[in-house]
Image (cartoon, rainbow, N blue to C red):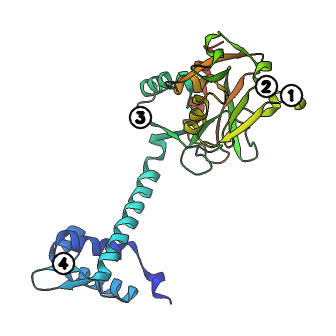
Amino acid sequence: MDGRTELELRHLRCLVTIVDSGSFTDAAIELGVSQAAVSRTLLALERILGVRLLHRTSRTVTPTTAGVQVLARARHLLAETDELVHQAATGHTRLRIGHAWSAMGRHTAEFQRRWHDRHPGIELHLIRHNTPTGGLAEGLCDLAVVRTPVDTRRYAHALVGHERRYVALASDDPWAKRRSVRLEEARGRTLVVDRRTGTTTLDLWPEDVRPAVEYTHDIDDWLAAIATGRCIGITPRATATQYRRDGITYRPLRDAAPVAVHLIWRHHDPHPATPAVVALLRDLYRADT
């Protein structure tokens, strides 16, 4: 059998404990085994890897050159394993909600407050990840708030509300002095769009009267392009709430359909708190109507 397949976490933990405690005797006490067992485990690890890992004298234990490299990797692997165990043990006492740009928009702070009050035993984490699923496809969250079309084959979903569209402008743009802008007017300007996660598409206009477009891949780049004055952006109200920046002004866009806000999650093994999240978000968005 290939020696590498015999490597176990106990071998790595033994090595780390010997080095951290400073002796085989202290390592044995910390691990709850005999000193002879510690020696056998280390020898087994050295045999599996084919290198000597420690210099041993009657008073000191120090890593060899190879030992230093193995020790660093061992610490990383053990930390990853401990995190995996922790996540499995606390999976239902922690809730991670992902989003690409704007979380729950103007409802974000109130959502966090009400969640803490109503569900103190479930720790809430909001995670921003600039992908179409807000980190759900990447395994970074349990649920995600999305404002783009949902792939219903891959994800379960619930419509929680709608958000009005706004125009984002440079603050010295003539339109910034107006109370609102018509959708038809925007076709005469250059539009900046986030290609991956943006909610704006050219389908808002007839095919023969669509605006010119520049593409970006991140909210910061999107805002920077608008601040120059050469572009405008069209975005849900949530962006206007979450990204107030010097040099950027937001104005309501008339005659444009609102943006649907969905919560998505995996079809199999949804987080037990999912119905509670859906209900709370719907309550908050319902107050807008």
Query: Residue 32 vs residue 201: left or right?
Result: left
Where 209 sits versus 9, above or below?
above
Quick check: marks 3 and 1 in contact, CB under 8 Å? no
The residues bearing labels 3 and 1 have C-alpha atoms spaced at a distance of 53 Å
Discs 2/3, front: 2
Q: What element does badge 3 sit on?
A: loop
Which residue has dot 1 on it?
A: 209
Q: What element does badge 1 sit on?
A: helix
Q: Earlier in the sequence, mark 3 or mark 1?
A: 3
Residue 121's tag is 3
Which residue has dot 2 on it?
A: 187
Give percent across and percent down for residue 70: 35, 76
Q: What element does badge 4 sit on?
A: helix
Q: Residue at x 65, y 48 (%)?
A: 268
Q: At label 3, which amino acid type do we have?
A: Gly
Give percent across and percent down for residue 256: 76, 20
Which residue has dot 4 on it?
A: 24
Quick check: marks 4 and 3 in contact, CB under 8 Å? no
Q: Earlier in the sequence, mark 4 or mark 3?
A: 4
Q: Nearer the viewer, residue 145 or 31?
A: 145
